[in-house]
Image (cartoon, grey):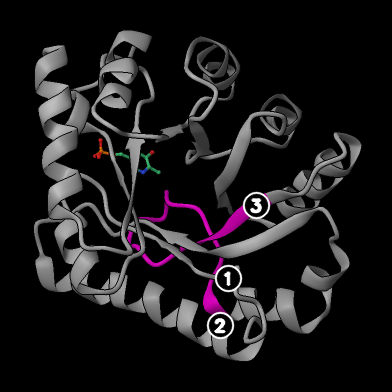
Amino acid sequence: MTLEQIKENITQLHNELPAGVKLVAVSKFHPIEALQAAYDAGQRIFGESRAQEIGPKHTAMPQDVEWHFIGHLQSNKVRQIVPYVSLIHSIDSERLLRCVDDEARRAGRTTDILLQLHVAREETKYGFTLDECRALADNGIIDSLANVRIRGVMGMATNTDDETEIHREFHAIRNTFDQLKASHFDTCPYFDTVSMGMSHDYRIAIDEGTTMVRIGTTIFGLREY
Ligand SMILES: *Cc1c(COP(=O)(O)O)cnc(C)c1O
C-alpha cells in the first residue's frame, strides 16, 4: 500500500463503520510511516501484537495515540507493555490476568483488559469458555484484582469461508458478553466492549453486535514477517 492508499482506507472504514463501533488499526510489523499516514487520516487507536514493538512505536508516534495489545501475551512480557497500553485484548488465562494485575500495581496503574474467549474450532486459538469466565466472576477472583479493570470480551472466529459458522461464533461471543453484563457487571458502565472482527470477517461481526473491530490487512496491506 502507498501512504495515500492507507489514508484512503482509513477514511473509508471510518465512513463505513456504524456509530458505536471503534476501529483498532492493527499495525503490527508495519513501519512508523504507515502508522503516521493512518494517524494523519484521523486514526487514533493502534493494535500491536509484539511486546517489543509497542515501546518504540509509542515513542515515535504522537502522544494522543491509544495503544492496544491484541496478540498472545506471555507473562514475562507483561512488564514491558503495561506502561504503554490502554487496553489488552488478549487475556486468556487466570495466570495472565493475575500477572497483569501484579505488574499494573507495581507500575502504580490500573490496566484495562478484555477476556479472550475461545469459540473457534481451531485448537490453536487461546481463551476462556463462558463457564470459565463465569467462574472467575463467581469465585470472587475478578473482584479481588484491584489493578485490572475488565472492559469486556474479545474473540476470533474460525478461519473459514463458511459464513454461517462465523455468524454462529460471533453470536456466541456477543451472547457471552451479554450474559456477563447481566450477571456480574450489571452495575459497571465500563463493561462495554465486544472486540471481534478482522479484515475478512468484520462485516459479519458488525451484524452480530461487535463494538470494536481489529483491522490490519485491509488498511496496511500484507505484513512482511
Ligand atoms: C493480526 C491480528 C488482527 C488483524 O488481522 P487482519 O486480518 O490483518 O485484519 C486482528 N486481531 C488479532 C488478534 C490479530 O493478531
The kind of secondary structure element at disc 3 is strand
CB within 8 Å, label 1 to label 2:
yes
In this rendering, does residue 60 appear at all? yes
Q: Residue at x 16, y 23 (%)?
A: 6
Residue in the picture at 47% in, 79% down: 176
The quadrant in which residue 19 appears is bottom left
Q: Earlier in the sequence, mark 1 or mark 3?
A: 3
What numbered label is drawn on residue 78?
Answer: none
Amino acid, disc 1: Phe
Residue position marked by numbered label 1 in the rendering: 191
Q: In the image, is residue 109 above or below residue 209? A: above
Residue 187 is situated, as x and y percent measured from the top left of the image, at 67, 84
Q: Residues within 10 Å of mark 2 (few under 14, many from 20)?
A: some
Mark 1: C-beta under 8 Å from nearest atom of ligand 1: no
**Residue at image mark 3:** 112
The answer for how far apart the CA atoms under marks 3 and 2 are is 16 Å
Could you tell me which secondary element the residue under label 1 belongs to?
A: loop
> Which amino acid lies under the numbered mark 3 shown in the image of this protein?
Asp
Residue at (9, 21) in percent of width and height: 5
Q: Is residue 33 left or right of residue 131?
A: left
- Which amino acid type is marked by label 2? Lys
Ligand 1 sits in quadrant: top left
| Cα separation between marks 1 and 2 | 7 Å
